[in-house]
């Protein structure tokens, strides 16, 4: 494959004031064999007008609309973009971020010259409206299982970081349309569970905009928090099916995050009667706390009861000794 086609897939919603800068950075790529598929998620500003200027001037830009039978949100738009794309390599990108000129060239070279790889990833910068930038450093060579490293060893990827081979993505569930938060983390963790071959290289190849409202941040706060809970539960279920040296430690950490997220969701409800609508979480607490032993189970159940009755009980329910993160946020 001498000159593989790269499909750049961008979901967008009300980005008329930002997306032009993103698309200009694509035009400036030193690697030119790409198609850029922009999926509009129901914009109500002049985003489509801006996009039409690009599609009319360069046929490599293609505008699609999220089908009406798909759930609103960036996840469905990303998935639909993949369906209509044709490239051998796939790059999901965000409608407010910026590619450095060598981004595609660098990653295409790596994949094209390493036939065994399924994807490659990279580091990135953050940039702010005042012109300041910060580098984001990930752990490029973790000495642990990738699933463990992704949670606990700073070995993470943002959505635009990887360049994927389509052959690896085909027939896999991509972005979870029912998640309103942690969707990129969920996607990458699930892809890692398939044991792909990949490299994480040290180049800073794009920059992520900070200081404005993201597409997903407009969703209901409760839906976002429940999405985080679902992400941790999904991750636990994946880990539970695997065998690797750090499995037990990672499971304990995930249980810590699950119980903490349940506490956070329920404690937001200040009304005593209303809190009892979350009683169904008792089943999850049973499943995960019992995994740690009968004593832990009874402590967690006591904490949950205190939470429902008095909005207290954090120290009984959330086991901070299982927070194994090196750099806690």
Image: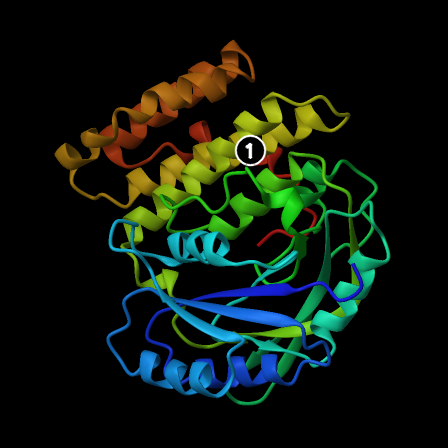
Residue drawn at x 74%, y 77% is: 102
Residue 67 lies, in percent from the top left, at: 30, 56
Regarding residue 319, the answer to whether it shows in the image is: no
Q: Is residue 306 left or right of residue 197?
A: left
- Which corner quadrant of the image does residue 271 belong to? top left
Indicate the quadrant containing the C terminus: top left, top right, bottom left or bottom right.
bottom right
Looking at the image, which is closer to me, 298 or 223? 223
State the image coordinates of residue 204 (x, y, percent, origin top left).
Answer: 73, 71
Residue under the point 67% across and 72% down: 33
Residue that appears at 54% across and 34% down: 235
Estimate the x, y position of residue 29 in percent, counting from the top left. 67, 80
Number of dots carrying numbers? 1
Residue labelled with disc 1: 254
Residue 323 versus residue 139 in the image, above or below: above
Residue 99 visible to the viewer:
yes
- Residue 299 percent across, percent down from the top left: 44, 20
Q: Label 1: how many residues lie within 10 Å, few (<14), some (14-19) or many (20+)?
A: many
Give the quadrant of the N terminus.
bottom right
Question: Based on the displayed image, in which of its 4 quarters is residue 228 positioned?
Answer: top left
Kindly identify the residue that appears in the image at 54 percent across and 16 percent down: 291
200 with respect to 300 (left or right): right
Please name whichever residue, 178 or 25, is drawn nearer the observer in this view of the structure: 25
- Is 306 situated above or below 50? above
- Which residue is nearer to you in this view: 325 or 31? 31
């Amino acid at each position: 494959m001498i000159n593989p086609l790269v499909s750049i897939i961008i979901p967008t919603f009300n980005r008329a004031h930002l997306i032009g800068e993103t698309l200009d950075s694509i035009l400036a790529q030193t690697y030119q064999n790409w198609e850029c598929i922009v999926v509009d998620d129901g914009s109500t500003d002049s985003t489509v007008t801006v996009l039409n200027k690009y599609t009319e001037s360069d046929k490599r830009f293609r505008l699609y609309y999220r089908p009406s039978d798909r759930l609103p949100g960036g996840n469905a738009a990303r998935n639909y973009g993949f369906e209509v794309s044709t490239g051998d390599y796939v790059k999901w990108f965000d409608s407010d971020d910026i590619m450095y000129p060598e981004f595609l060239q660098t990653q295409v070279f790596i994949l094209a010259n390493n036939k065994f790889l399924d994807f490659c990833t990279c580091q990135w910068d953050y940039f702010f409206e005042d012109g300041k930038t910060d580098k984001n450093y990930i752990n490029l060579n973790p000495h642990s299982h990738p699933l463990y490293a992704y949670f606990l060893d700073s070995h993470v990827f943002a959505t635009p970081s990887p360049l994927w081979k389509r052959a690896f993505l085909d027939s896999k569930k991509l972005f979870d349309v029912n998640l309103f938060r942690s969707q990129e983390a969920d996607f990458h963790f699930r892809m890692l569970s398939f044991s792909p071959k990949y490299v994480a290289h040290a180049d800073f190849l794009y920059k992520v905009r900070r200081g404005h409202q993201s597409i997903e941040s407009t969703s209901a706060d409760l839906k976002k928090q429940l999405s985080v809970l679902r992400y941790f539960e999904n991750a636990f279920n994946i880990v539970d099916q695997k065998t690797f040296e750090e499995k037990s430690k990672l499971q304990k950490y995930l249980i810590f995050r699950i119980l903490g997220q349940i506490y956070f969701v329920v404690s937001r409800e200040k009304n005593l009667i209303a809190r009892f609508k979350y009683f169904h979480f008792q089943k999850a607490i049973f499943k995960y706390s019992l995994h740690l032993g009968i004593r832990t189970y009874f402590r967690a159940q006591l904490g949950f009861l205190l939470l429902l009755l008095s909005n207290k009980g954090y120290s009984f329910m959330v086991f901070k000794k299982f927070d194994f993160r090196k750099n806690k946020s």
